[in-house]
Image: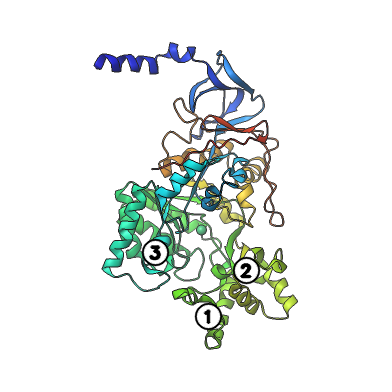
Amino acid sequence: MNRLRLTLAAVLFAPTLLHAQQLDLLIRNGSVLDGSGSPAIHADIGIAGDRIVLIEPHIARAAKRTIDATGLVVTPGFIDPHTHTAADLSDPKRAHNEPYLTQGVTTVVTGNDGDSPIDIAATLAKWKQQGIGTNAALFIGQGTVRREIMQMSDAAPTPAQLEQMKSLVAKAMDGGAIGISTGLYYAPGSYATTEEVIEVSKVAAQHGGIYDTHIRDESSYTIGLLASVRETIRIGKEAHIPVMISHIKALGADVWGQSTQVIALIDDARTAGLNVTASQYPYNASGSSVVASLVPRWAEADGKLVQNLSDPALHDRLVQEMTENLVRRGGADSLLMTSSKDKSILGKTLAQIAKERHESPVDAAIQISANGDSSVASFNMKDADIEAFMRQPWVMTCSDGSNGHPRKYGTFPRKLRDYVFDKPVITLPFAIRSSTSLPAQTLGLKDRGLLKQGYFADVLVFDPRTIRDLATYESPRVLATGVRYLTVNGQLAVDNGALTSTLAGRPLTH
Ligand SMILES: [Zn+2]
């Protein structure tokens, strides 16, 4: 038995045998950034099966396919810790995940903002059976769990209801979720107290998961930005769970400049030993909806949104609070309609719509909200805050990709183009790390996020001269350019700049 093990070990690890093995793919002469943040080295990369088997200055081995990466940059495939791709991945027509592959993304995480499929195991099994273009991992959403037990009630849970929620979280973690997400800004997640969130998060912690959050207030709606960051840190401390703040930002004039205080709070928490990180997309507009950005949460309670919006007795209170919220968002000019079942409002700002209808922006917003809502691009961030957050070693890249916002198609190339190559806010090794090893380590994705012998062969080869985003607010669904080659688990998903039809992605569990 021992002898057999020794023999196996010799076969697996003997360098001579490894060298004798024919490679499936050899990527030669590239400028290699391994994802750790170290500077580029000149090296060849050998791939066999789904793994990286060699990284050396010069590999003299036969390979079934050789790619000459002279003048190109070779990095780990990007890992996006916050997307809204669950529906895409479950639909065989969209499971290829083209908007992400063309950005160099090989792994997406979804189920963020407190909103996920309730049956994690079944969803992962479906993806495995149908095939997906990128790797994908899931959070269990706290809002989803709460809705399952309490629908849209804004009440506190009974002890029995809390136990039911906790057992749903446990089931999801056993089914392969990588942690729990919250959307404490959105209903029904917003109806949960900090203590309730801590209780359900403890269950995720016991299963080795992490906590990912769209914080309660990124602006000055309720408790404010800084109190929301403090709440997140408290949840991490009391639930004994690593916490990750999604799409970190200072939203609206009331909190512009507060990136300084937010960074200080997080640095202090990290110095005290807590695992606090954040993700960020490189755009000054967030993606939201008219209801989420303007309508107060009490109006959504118990599923009575449409009824409340048309109740004359509530009209004055609604108008007053929505007027304040519109000021927070920067006024009616800063909300651009990006997707709606009412095609007549697409591509227009709330100000334009109100003018056409000869009514106030808030009355127009109430009409849109009652008529099935509309997605908006909400221009509400300052460059100084965006850049301050981006420079932090605990901030990773995320797309938060949603339909109607260009970030779904452009995030990762845009960060390189705008913040590394055109305006050097961060260095290239730092940017690559923020999109590879940092998310892999934060999310607990084993053997991914680095170019390293033995790691999965999720490898990106891009042209630093041409990589850029092409999606805009006017045309948000334009694929990015500059990715020349991309392997997912050793299979070419992009070959010489063109998408292949391979579905080499895998569901990833914690
Ligand atoms: Zn969010």
Residue 247: x and y in percent read 52, 54
Residue 487: x and y in percent read 56, 32
Residue nearest the observer in this picture, 273 or 364 = 364
Q: CA distance from mark 3 to mark 1?
A: 22 Å
Q: Residue furthest right?
A: 356
Upstream in sequence: badge 2 or badge 1: 1
Question: Quadrant location of the N terminus?
Answer: top left
Residue 332: x and y in percent read 66, 71
Q: CA distance from mark 2 to mark 1?
A: 28 Å
Query: Taking 73 as reference, is 180 left or right?
Result: left
Question: Of circles 2 and 3, which is in front?
Answer: 3
Q: Amino acid at mark 3?
A: Glu
Q: Residue furthest bottom?
A: 313
Q: How is the image coloured?
A: rainbow
Residue 330 — which label? 2
Give the residue at mark 3: 148
Residue nearest the observer in this picture, 376 or 120 = 120
Q: Residue furthest left?
A: 1
Q: Residue at x 34, y 55 (%)?
A: 169
Upstream in sequence: badge 3 or badge 1: 3
Give the residue at mark 1: 307
